[in-house]
Image: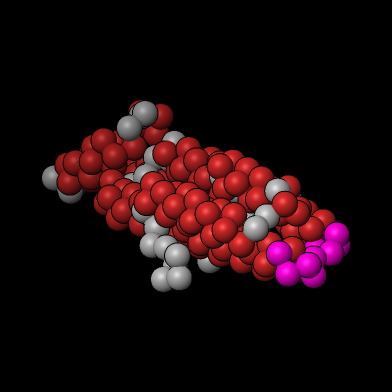
Amino acid sequence: AKQLLTHTDTRVACDSVKQLQASWKTIGKTWFKEDQSSWNEFRQTCDAVFARRQEETNAAQAERQAILNQANQLIGVIRDLSQQNFTDASAVKTQIESTQQQFAVLDLPRDQAKGLQQSMQNAVQAVNDKIHQHKLQAEKNRWQVIYSVAKELHGFEVSVIAGKSNEESCEAISKLISSNDWPKTIASALQSRLINAKNLTSADVEISNKKLRELVLRADILAGRESPEDE
């Protein structure tokens, strides 16, 4: 039994101890004092073997729980991202990748691995969906600004023809065009119209409006967007 105290496999050691205990019961009658002394020593040795096994079991359970806690914490990080308003999608994606890498190296318990992996996938998908929606909304907002500036430019052109234009309006529109991240073709068309506004006639305005509408419609088609009804 004492040899089992240093056995590398505590499960095998415990099984062997149980067999020795069963064998002890088959031993015939002995002197009481000698029997009691030997039994006490044998029992203490057996208890020590079982104690080693229990320590290993407790340590394994603690490690298992620590891994589960870490896995759930990482899943929680991704879930929290889906509740945020994204101002930098690339930074969010970088954080997702980093979190997934940390999750991937975890030695997940077999009986929990599939469920945890599915939870992580669901959390990541929720964030990606949110990023996609944010991107669509940002694109929609950008085009709304384009339409708004185009209308302001049209109003400026009308005022030029009517002899009521002013330089401040021209500068304000120019700043709006140059300060926004727009498709180059749209920005160029608007700037060109603004530069040529002082020499416009009503016929020129109609031609320019038609060209701009066609350009915006082409951009909408390429992007898979629906154009406003007035376009």
- Location of the C terminus by quadrant is bottom left
Answer above or below: position of 227 versus 204.
Answer: below
Q: Residue at the spot x=75%, y=54% of the render?
A: 198
Answer above or below: position of 43 versus 202.
Answer: above
Q: Residue 11: x percent and y percent?
A: 29, 39
Q: Residue at the spot x=56%, y=42% of the render?
A: 185
Q: Nearer the viewer, residue 183 or 171?
A: 171
Q: Residue at the spot x=13%, y=45% of the render?
A: 26
Q: Is residue 160 magenta?
A: no
- Residue 148 sits in quarter: bottom right
Residue 206 placement, left or right of 87: left
Q: Residue at the spot x=85%, y=59% of the render?
A: 167
Can residue 64 be seen here? The reply is no
Q: Which residues are magenta?
A: 161-169
- Residue 129 sits in quarter: bottom left
Q: Residue 87: x percent and y percent?
A: 63, 56
Can residue 108 be seen here? The reply is yes
Identify the coloring: secondary structure
- Residue 161 sits in quarter: bottom right
Report the number of discs.
0
Q: Nearer the viewer, residue 116 or 99?
A: 99
Q: Nearer the viewer, residue 117 or 54?
A: 117
Q: Residue 77: x percent and y percent?
A: 53, 56
- Location of the N terminus by quadrant is top left
Residue 137 placement, left or right of 197: left
Q: Nearer the viewer, residue 50 or 223?
A: 223
Residue 212 placement, left or right of 42: right
Q: Is residue 167 magenta?
A: yes
